[in-house]
Image (spheres, rainbow, N blue to C red):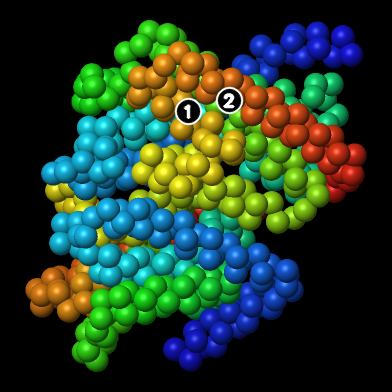
Amino acid sequence: MTKYLRLLAIQMRISIASAIAYRANFIIEGVMSAAWLGLTLFPLVVLYDERKSVNGWDLPSALIVMAYFTALRALLEGIVSPSLTALVEKIRDGSFDYVLLKPIDAQVVVSASRYEPWKLFDFAGAIAIAVYAFVKRGYAPSGGELALGLGMFVAGTIAMYSLWIVCAAASFWVGRLDNLMFLLGAIFDTARWPIAVFPGAWRFVFTFVIPVAVMTTFPAMALLGTLDARTIAATVGGALLMLVLSRLVWRAAIRNYTSASS
Amino acid sequence: MRSTTVRTIRALPTLLRIGVAETVAYRAEFLVWILTTTQPLIMMSLWTSVARDQSFHGFTSAAFVAYYLSNLIVRQLTGNWVAWQMMDEIRMGTMAMRLLRPIHPFFAYVSSHVAAIPFRTLVALPLAVILLVTSGADNLSHDPVQLAMLPISIGLAWLLTFAILFAIGSLAFFMTQTMALANLYFGLYALLSGYLLPLALMPRLAAVAAWLPFRYTLDVPVLIMTRTMSGEELAGLLGRQAAWVAITLFLALQIWHAGVRRFESVGG
């Protein structure tokens, strides 16, 4: 276990070092992430300028969903996406062989092999949105709600990660598949909205088929104290089930791997 | 000069054939790319649900359906990825190969992207039919002149989008951060072209957008498709659209020429 932690720490240090090498990027990335945050919030502002509440969601609670979405997107674009894009490259040029030869679990290594440290800006933005939402709402979450909300964030992260690892595993069979990740990203975009604002059929799809509700809406409800125990159990159970399934798919994919080089 | 033009015209059919062959060869990837444009569909379902009981800024549910489906059709027909293609080729040095050919790379890029249009039409046409059936008569234009001008407006939108992205791609000759620039462009585009939300929902932003090229890549063809307007208004929109195409094309080619002069290929 410590072996893995040490390895991840080294990988993170390398990424940070290479990010710091481009110092001008610091400003560009900061400005960009603020701009994107503004862009993400824009439709929300337009909507709630006109309406008090939409299908039971008022502005502060919708902002909490947005905060979860922003934090999750920071993790996605900061760790998961760059790492798995690197994996797809390795599979294509055959250097994935060297990863498999190492005396460690390949999934752990590839899942966090590359970081974009600047995405920390987005993380800060997410916290700012959440704080603003609670100020606007008028009262802070209780300790229990906060703990539950954080726990559910972990569940949401697991659900997201599982979906992406399955997608990456698919590239063992199909070869080049980075644009499938773009597609997944486009679908993930719906997670910025509370699931309740969508019409019924979409709600079903986004809860059970592609569980974006698990990633942001349910965690937000947990933090707001409006989520019942059964949904909490189902969310955590669902996230863990996805993790197990994705692990099985990954293992099957590895067995199927035929090196591209030599 | 004359012989260059003749050469380009003679080469055009072959270039188009190559473009079609490329698109067919990567059909799976191409399809996934097309599917990635799901944003209008998501926004459509969101806003129809919001406007179900009470119209929003004058938009009924049906009006939102008509707006976002037209939006999707125009986006499918006019979308291209030339900026990303150029960034890759400049970074990897393969741009040198293009420069060696006796045809201006601009036309080579144009023809390979024009060749993709029939495939994009295959995706967009069924959508057009759905649009006509579902959102009914009152949310689409019936004016024959307007409908006749629609292909022209979409064509101009295509050229404008292409020119802007060609300019951004050409900037890769000067700087390494063009990816961030392309993202920034997309952000501005999403907001100011009506891609994310109808400009009518944001009157203050619409006033700014009126002075910028973005709305002429998407909002204008969508308006011509969905709203009945006077002949003068139509002519004005088309005229300004054509003016933006001319300005942007000129600037894009200037950036290209300045960039090529300082281009040093590595590898290739």
Name the residue type under label 2. Answer: Gln
* Residue A179 appears in the picture as rendered: yes
| Rendered location of residue B120, percent (x, y) | 46, 26
Q: Assess disc 2: are there few (<14), some (14-19) or many (≥20) residues with their C-alpha within 10 Å of its C-alpha.
A: many
User: Is A209 or B214 nearer to us in this picture?
Assistant: B214
| Rendered location of residue B53, percent (x, y) | 13, 44
Q: What residue is drawn where x is 80% and y is 21%?
A: B103
In space, the residues marked 1 and 2 are separated at their CA atoms by 8 Å
Q: What residue is drawn where x is 35% and y is 24%?
A: B226
Q: What residue is drawn where x is 63% and y is 74%?
A: A15
Q: Is residue B196 shown left or right of residue A23?
A: left
Cβ atoms under marks 1 and 2 closer than 8 Å: yes
Total residue callouts:
2
Q: Chain of mark 2?
A: B
Name the residue type under label 1. Answer: Val
| Rendered location of residue A250, percent (x, y) | 38, 62
Q: Is residue A28 shown left or right of residue B78?
A: right
Q: Earlier in the sequence, mark 1 or mark 2?
A: 1
| Quarter location, residue B115 | top right
Residue B195 to residue A29: above or below:
above
Tag 2's secondary structure?
A: helix
Q: Is residue A179 shown left or right of residue A54?
A: right
Name the residue tied to disc 1. Answer: B220
Q: Which mark is residue B43?
A: none
| Rendered location of residue A38, percent (x, y) | 47, 61
Q: Which mark is residue B241?
A: 2
Q: What residue is drawn where x is 44% and y is 89%?
A: A1
* Residue A170 appears in the picture as rendered: no
Residue B76 to residue A133: above or below:
above
